Amino acid sequence: MKRPKRLIIFIFLIIISLAVARVTIENSISTTGVELIGYEEKIEEYKKSNAQLEERYLEKSSLTKISVSAREKGFIESKNQVYLSTPLPLAIKSTQAE
Amino acid sequence: MSWRYKFSLFAFFVLFFLVTARLFYWQVVRASELQSIAQSQYGRNILLPAERGEIKTSDDYSVVANKLSYLVFANPKEVEDKSELSDALAPILKTESSTISAQLKLDRFWVPIKNHIDHKAKEKIESLKFKGVGFEKQSSRFYPEASMSAKLFGFVGKDDNGSDKGYFGLEGFYDRQLRGKSTHAVVIHDAAGRPILSKLEGKTGQSDGRSLTLNINRSIQFMLDETLKDGVERYGATGGMAAIMDPKTGAMIAMSSFPTFDPKEYQEYSDKLYRDPLISDTYEPGSTFKPLVMAAGLDAGLIKPDTKCPICSGPVEIGGYEIRTWNNKYVTQGTMTDVIKRSDNTGMVYIGQSLGLDRMMSYINKFGFGEQTGIDLQGEVVPSIRPRDSWYPIDLATSSFGQGITVTPIQLLTAFSAIANNGNRMEPHVVSKITTVDGESIEIKPKLLGKPVSERTAHVVTEMMVNAVDNGESKFAKPKGYRIAGKTGTAQIPVEGHYDANKTIASFIGFAPADDPKFLMLVVIDRPTTSIYGAETAAPIFFTAAKNMFTYYGIPPSE
């Protein structure tokens, strides 16, 4: 029986290329741990800063705080409102007049 | 077969069995233990806590948010000078030095010092550079509006396992939605402890809590809190409560009660303050109940607005009791409209007697008394309506003017939504929307509970209530130019089998603008001392709040 030389060579090359690929990938992954720690720390820092900013935003826009601050600055509540009534359109006015 | 051969075969069988048994022992019996030992060598088990969902008012402002906080812990075996550390930490953590010192004296590798410290305190401690002190990230509830609506929101405490759990109000009712699902995950690391790019095993299953968006309007809530607090102080009352509802949808716009508590420091307050009286307290509604009985009489076709009261010329005697008007003044030939205007008890007795017990009970049930309103808050109570066979003629008479029958404020408000909303009684709802972590929204739609009276009856009662406001005892406080439908109430408090004449629950219920109501509001003042009457205490608070509501909604005067 004739040996399938081409097939054997093809399989051999695949095995070699997969082995090289694995070594290359593992080599690159093995050094990403340090990078990963850096990214995780950055994410953590951003999350923390985001949470602190949100906290500050909520504190500053609280009605309880704003009203105290307004009172301290001398603002007083308006007791009288003036409503300006809009005149009716002319067409409706004349209909009502009839 | 020779014995040697047999012996060898047997020996091999025994050895094979022993090896199998040993393998079974390690791989099955002690599998989980070995797995965790292995895991500790190549990975680190970390807790992925679920962040509790936020509670937002209708303007999307987080009134109950989460704050980043830290747990301070120490390893007593690493701490060099325990008393120096205790003295240094005490002022920063605002705790006793002896408390910290007691923890540090324990023969352990890890002791907690204080929970939920903020980042400023953490930075201060870090700058001291003490050996053996560490921090663990935590999340704690943050209330930017301080104690606003504390009873409505409830608070977060701990359950039997030490996990966060919501109690009372919204935190209690929606606890399962808000709490989310925590889980553990394994981070794979190399020999030096650096993480290897790898997926977090077991991360699936973790999800943060859902957020709630409320119907509560923050500006109106703030205004109502201020107005009520001011009113309670001005009238020397022991407490007070007020709620505002959109009668067309049942959406709760504001809910306020005093005295209240600080949800952040809830442990420092009496547990009696945790209950929201609007849903958990019962009281006799007094005259605020009259428009409902009037509506029943009109709806049943027994009376008309101009029907003359035949028994209103003097006190009415029933079963040995004498029923009088609140001011002991009587009119002959007064109409039903006058009965509401003058808050005439004798006129209400006439309507009660005309209705009879069966019809009276039927309308009481139709208005939702004796059952839960279905409000989405933890702690709603249902005062029971006495069974039919234990009603006496005097009970029918007194309940027609709101004495001898107990209700919760939310029940009364829900019943009045039928008068303000063309006869349709709506389910009260605090939450308008639940939002998942993926941003998906679950809308909570308005729900019709029933139609106790016809649209026509609702309009007639509305006009009677407008007349009561314009010409009744509280007209001095009414904002000019607005059509407001309302009714005062002054109910005596039953104490040890009798009513105390000087202790009352003063209330006012009403809605405006009467022709197209934007809001329905109830104000209840507990034991006012400057005056015992609702017209002189609860009504001015109602009208002050109503004026602010008109300004807020931009509603101009109509008259």
Image (spheres, rainbow, N blue to C red):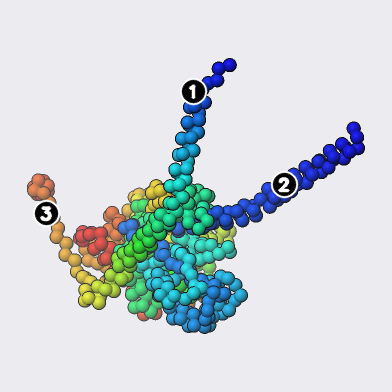
Say which of B333 and A96 sits in front.
Answer: A96
Q: Amino acid at mark 1?
A: Arg
Q: Quadrant of residue B62?
A: bottom left
Res. B411 image quadrant:
bottom left
Q: Is B103 in front, or is B458?
A: B103
Q: Residues within 10 Å of mark 3 (few under 14, many from 20)?
A: few
Q: Can the viewer see residue B106?
A: yes
Q: Chain of mark 3?
A: A
User: Mark 2 or 3, which is nearer the eye?
Assistant: 2
Q: Quadrant of the N terminus of chain B?
A: top right
Q: Which element type, helix, strand or loop, lies under badge 2?
A: helix
Say whether disc 1 or disc 3 marks the residue closer to the N-terminus.
Answer: 1
Co-location on one chain, circles 1 and 2: no
Q: Look at the numbered discs 1 and 3 and tell me whether their residues touch, using CB distance below 8 Å.
A: no
Q: Residue at (30%, 67%) from the top-left corner?
A: A60
Residue B259, numbered circle = none
Separation of residues labelled 1 and 2 (CA atoms): 47 Å
Q: Is residue B490 visible?
A: no
Which-is-in-front pick, marks 1 and 2? 1
Q: Which residue is mark 1?
A: A6
Q: Quadrant of the C terminus of chain B?
A: bottom left
**Towards the viewer: B121 or A83:** B121
Label 2 resides on the chain identified as B
Residue type at numbered disc 2: Phe
What is the x, y in percent for residue B172? 49, 60
